[in-house]
Amino acid sequence: MEVIRIPRIMQDTSRGHLLHSRTLGFVPTMGALHEGHMSLMRMSKEENSVTAASIFVNPTQFGPSEDFASYPRKMEADIAKLREADIDILFLPDVSLMYPEGFATLVEVTGLSEKMCGHFRPGHFRGVTTVVAKLLTIVRPSRAYFGQKDFQQTVVIKRMAKDLNLDTEIVVCPTIREYDGLAMSSRNTYLSGEQRAAATVLYRSLCRASDAIKAGTRSGAAVRDMLQQDLSREPLITGIDYASVFIPETLDEADEITGEVVLAIAARMGSTRLIDNMLVVPSFSH
Amino acid sequence: MEVIRIPRIMQDTSRGHLLHSRTLGFVPTMGALHEGHMSLMRMSKEENSVTAASIFVNPTQFGPSEDFASYPRKMEADIAKLREADIDILFLPDVSLMYPEGFATLVEVTGLSEKMCGHFRPGHFRGVTTVVAKLLTIVRPSRAYFGQKDFQQTVVIKRMAKDLNLDTEIVVCPTIREYDGLAMSSRNTYLSGEQRAAATVLYRSLCRASDAIKAGTRSGAAVRDMLQQDLSREPLITGIDYASVFIPETLDEADEITGEVVLAIAARMGSTRLIDNMLVVPSFSH
């Protein structure tokens, strides 16, 4: 595995592959790699001749009161996993090379960035779209892989890549879950044993709401109430940022369920913020 | 000359040249081509194996009370000039292909965009950096050419290209002037005969201030007063947005002249807004 720390060298390496007509798959991460990340790596390896991963804990997508300092960093274990997965290139830039002195440019997707998590994490998606725009112009992949667990992120990044004519296909892969349904996340390591057990309430309530939609529920308010009641019954949930049903393209809440929707939750367990979501296609046969 | 109207086709064409290791020079314009534009075309042809020009009157860089609707459009004459100059590719996208329905992404250079013209044209540079980011990811040139006449624009675009790791060298070429010193601009066609004659006051006052600096003047305020007095004496100048001496890197006004500075003016003649500038390196030998 080639480890590249300098953006310019990554760009030249990528150009070299392009000149040889090789397809390049790219999996951008913030490290603390889990099975969710590794599923993206495997997908990239299947679909491309070369796969690059990046590890960069991007400071600009964390709010001032968020967990940038404590975000899990496990570089040695991460590198071992990437080697084990036979990844070709690890791009590992330093913050000072991504944001050198005088850096002043922001890439922002208006509208979509302010919905859902945007209300609770102002500036978060601007940080995400700025760093992903940079990563995509540095790595210039044919395809870039993101997990559906961060549903809003995938919608915002697809919009950004399209709007800025970035020549990269954004591929969204299914959420990978623990044996009991908890969506894998680097932040799960923040949870105590008790919290970890209780955290399955997100998945369980998504499943129940999905079943209700499939059984014929069409009222967005009814689905929202169901999700919020389920979450409220779990005493270790200390706050609900949102728990509702949204239209996947616009990220607006769905009043009436008339096509594919996304059930999505952001909830707090003490200082840990958990998110999860589920796409549901209602059946209209009955 | 190949005329390309579809961004995706432009991108594929450009990739084809890259695959053949050809350098691509790019001159983005809003049309109404004059000798200033043509000097950029010649420079590009000298330095690159292939030259592409674009004509796109970008709506998002015009304010609501500005001259988007009346901006001069001279497509036939422009195409004749580009053919005459032996330009290889003309990229001529439609607004609906550059900003399709649902377009939501903004590229903004904070700080630099708010100085100088930014005070008087809010949102202007955000429109410029967004469209130039798009054009550079569509055309993917080795080098892109801009005129020094739009000095702040060149500083903002250089910052954006660097910050977003766009693999394009931004080349700034000297301002081309009419026989009497007036900087060439597509907007000069708005001027009446009388205004056109009086418009040389911009160049004349820049020259006088430059001479003063070269003769030893070191006070920014003194230079600013000199520029403003010269302009005020011309009755056809109906407003001065700014006329002062700035630090080229930061675009802040220079209190004390201690190195290279840029003299810059934005002034109004009726409904026409004229800009001009001059880089000055003070001599410290005396």
Image (cartoon, coloured by chain):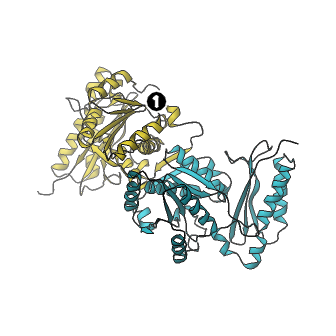
Chain colours: A yellow, B cyan
Q: Is residue A175 left or right of residue B244?
A: left
Q: Is residue A80 left or right of residue B269?
A: left
Q: Quadrant of the N terminus of chain A?
A: top left
Q: What amino acid is labelled 1 in the image? A: Phe
The percent position of residue B205, horizontal first and vertical second, equals 81, 61
- Looking at the image, the residue that sits furthest to the left is A286
The percent position of residue B21, horizontal first and vertical second, equals 42, 50
- Choose top left, top right, bottom left or bottom right for residue B237: bottom right
Q: What residue is drawn where x is 56% and y is 61%?
A: B61
Label 1 marks a residue whose chain is A
| Above or below, comparing residue B100 to residue A48 in the picture | below
Residue B11 in view, yes or no: yes
Q: Quadrant of the C terminus of chain A?
A: bottom left
Residue A166 in view, yes or no: no
- Choose top left, top right, bottom left or bottom right for residue A218: bottom left
Q: Nearer the viewer, residue A248 or A215?
A: A248
- Looking at the image, the residue that sits furthest to the bottom is B193
| Above or below, comparing residue B243 to residue B249 in the picture | below
- Choose top left, top right, bottom left or bottom right for residue A172: top left
Q: How many marks?
A: 1
**Secondary structure of residue under mark 1:** loop
| Above or below, comparing residue A147 to residue A161 in the picture | above
Q: Which residue is mark 1?
A: A68
Within 10 Å of disc 1 (Cα), the crowding (few <14, some 14-19, many 20+) is some
Q: Nearer the viewer, residue A73 or A114?
A: A73
The percent position of residue A3, horizontal first and vertical second, equals 39, 29
